[in-house]
Amino acid sequence: MKRIVMLDTGPLGRLAHAHARTEVAEWVDQLLAAEVVVVIPEITDYELRRNLLLEGLSASGMRLDELKDELTYLPLTTAFPAAAETGKTYYVDGPNP
């Protein structure tokens, strides 16, 4: 039976950061070497992406996209990436009247 590790925003954010923490990257590499399936749940992607957008961390957002290709992505719905952008607009600009 395959083992599965689902990342939450903490370790995923450290991996996506432009200056990724090597201890987290090494941990994920060890998991992958041990044939553990490392999963990025879409809700985690949404939460992290929204915060990266709010902080203007576009390089980290691009790295998050790369991680989705490198690890196993578990989608809930295709609406979440667009929802992150909408949420950023709401938090920055406020609700539309």
Image (cartoon, rainbow, N blue to C red):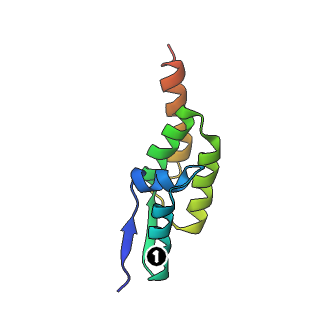
Look at 46% across and 76% down and name the residue there: 30
Q: Residues within 10 Å of mark 1 (few under 14, many from 20)?
A: few
Q: Which image quarter: residue 70?
A: bottom right
Look at 53% across and 51% down and name the residue there: 78
Looking at the image, the residue that sits furthest to the bottom is: 1
Numbered-mark total: 1
Q: Position of residue 56 (x, y in %)?
A: 60, 34
Q: Which image quarter: residue 67?
A: bottom right
5 vs 33: above or below: above
Look at 60% across and 49% down and name the residue there: 18
Q: Position of residue 61 (x, y in %)?
A: 60, 47
Q: What is the three-letter code of the residue carrying label 1?
A: Gln
Residue 35 visible in the picture: yes
Q: Is residue 63 left or right of residue 44?
A: right
Report which residue position mark 1 lands on: 30
Residue 83 visible in the picture: no
20 vs 53: above or below: below
Q: Is residue 66 left or right of residue 8?
A: right
Q: Quadrant of the N terminus?
A: bottom left
Viewer-nearest residue: 43 or 76: 43
Q: Which image quarter: residue 36?
A: bottom left
Looking at the image, the residue that sits furthest to the front is: 22
Viewer-nearest residue: 5 or 84: 5
